[in-house]
Image: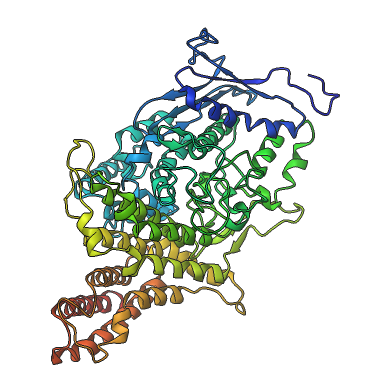
Amino acid sequence: RDPKLKMSPPKDPIVYYIEYTVPVRYRRWIRDGILYWNEAFKAVGLDGAIEVQFQDKETGANMDKDPEDVRYNFIRWLNNDISTAIGPHRANPMTGEILDADVVLTDGWIRAYWSWYNEQAPELATEGMSAETLDWLEGHPDWDPRMLLSTPDQRKQILALRAQRALERAAGQEVSSMSPALELNKDLAAIEASMGSKDDMCMAAHGLAFDMAFAPIALQMEGLLDDAQSAPDAPKSDDEKLDGIPEWFVGPLLSELVCHEVGHTLGLRHNFKASSLYTMEQVNSEEFKGKKPLAGSVMDYLPPNFNLGSGKEQGDFSMISIGPYDKWAIEYGYTFDDPKKVVSRVATPELAYLTDDDTDGPDPFARRYDFSAKPIEYAQNMMRIVAQHRGKILDKFVKEGQSWSRARTGYEMALGMQLRVVSMMSGWVGGAHVNRDRKGDPNGRLPVEVVSTAEQRAALQFVIDNALNDAAFGLTPDLLAHMTVDKWSDDSPGDRGESAYPVHDRVMAVQASVLSMLMNPTTLRRVYDNEFRTAADQDCVTLAEVMQKVNDAVYTELNTGLDGATYTNRKPMISSLRRNLQSGLTDRLIDLAGGDRAMPRTIRTLAAMHLRTLNDKLDGLLAKSNGGQMDEYTLAHLQDLKVRVDRALKTIQVTTGP
């Protein structure tokens, strides 16, 4: 109103009305999430740029305003089982001025706290995969996590959807880009169709549903669902609960979600690199707790900061304000100065930015649901929680009087987190950081910088340790004996599943998906290309190294041999899970070596080399098997590998030889 003042109220503040349908118990948290943005407007001299008013049925306040009226901005609340939150807006196409906006929330993500199972596993396993890889996987269903991690009925539906899309492409029709795993959810498919453009899609609440489902593991393990004061590092200020969830946990999460969606209504896109700003040590320190945001932007998809039980400080669980990038974006849009001066600060680390278009690219920081400047520390922390939880499922997670089906629920939640962090770290293999600095920007960085050799090797080892070893799954006969289902619901595939946990199918699906994360065309090509990007006198992760590391990890028993021991069918030389894994990798090597033109020739020749090496090891082991030291399971397994490798090598010689 007064441009002469350093800080002035605006002529026309942006007013958001909170609809009367929003439960009273959540309103203050929603209001706080909206008002977080005033901090950004203060940086450009606007005080009170955003205001919040409540629509209240009891008092009649603002009940004359219709949420559908283009003149009013509303925060709306729906009750359904869909975990979504969206922030659509309408703008003047001539000026770009945003005319009105509405944030629509549903309470489905809150109820997911109790009922989320493993339906998101295919999404977790394919998160970050490039469009090239996803398209390649459609033609290789045996490699595809969206197939491997789905139920038999879902696999049939996915194949039918793919056949339908093939017909649509042949007819020149536009084809949906949504994951087949999501397409099986009619509600989510309908939301995608209603939004029109993939750039308008916001799945923040959908991912938050997973985190709300995982919350019982991280909180109940420390006794925080029964007594908010029982853990030494638990919040002490408030032990109130909202729908059975500690308010100090779910309240700030709701504020963050609302703030994220309001950010969309102000014109901001997602910023998936914002979570790379601070380390776990920083965000879980007295310096940060209650004082600084966890990330560079609220426009990222941030998982809760679970650090309980680590013996260290527990920082804020979620964002408590907007981040430095958010202030920068608002400054650019509303500055009274030259906007070129604003964007010249692009190389400032706090302003890191990559968006939806970058999530299938080479930068591992352009990732949904990752966390920390050193994601491997976050991944290790989550695996610590997973391991601790698995040891307490039967004693602590399943309460007296509860169904033992909760043991399976608890295990699947932990397995989902394990899959998420393994998938996250697989993206660091072959990665390259992307910067959008322009020539002449102060402190300008290279547009493409290969991820450090140490980080790539550490990521590869993490994936191997936490997915390709039997011990990584924490399964025991006692735990498996209790992992059942109730069979009372007509809606949940989990309730209609087999009462005995299908342990081999489930573990093999996860391990096969992890092999796909590491050995898909895009990842292998990126590793190979990075060799050329790196100066010859510098160390780098090579394609040969990655393939050798995976082979050594999977075929370990073939390297050690019989060692003079005698094995039985009850104590086999190679465990049942390892036999499945070795068979799966052999299939992958055969596919890679078999002449698929999507694969660079170097990848095909390396795969053929490993098949020949495997063939030599099989010959040596089978020659020693006549003494009766080898169990029947292992003998049959090695014989099967031998037959398949022999056949593959003969085929390769015919198709790719001179």
Q: Position of residue 349 (x, y in %)?
A: 68, 53
Classify residue 227 as left or right of residue 555: right
Can residue 333 be seen by looking at this rendering?
Answer: no
505 or 289: which is nearer to us? Answer: 289
Quarter of image, res 178? top left
Q: Position of residue 241 (x, y in %)?
A: 45, 34
**Location of the N terminus (image quadrant):** top right
107 or 131: which is nearer to us? Answer: 107
Does residue 21 lie above or below 321 as drawn?
A: above
Rendered residue at 41%/54% (across/down): 420
Q: Position of residue 590 (x, y in %)?
A: 28, 71
Q: Position of residue 56 (x, y in %)?
A: 51, 13
Classify residue 514 as left or right of residue 375: left
Does residue 658 lie above or below 307 as drawn?
A: below
**Location of the C terminus (image quadrant):** bottom left
Quarter of image, res 186? top left
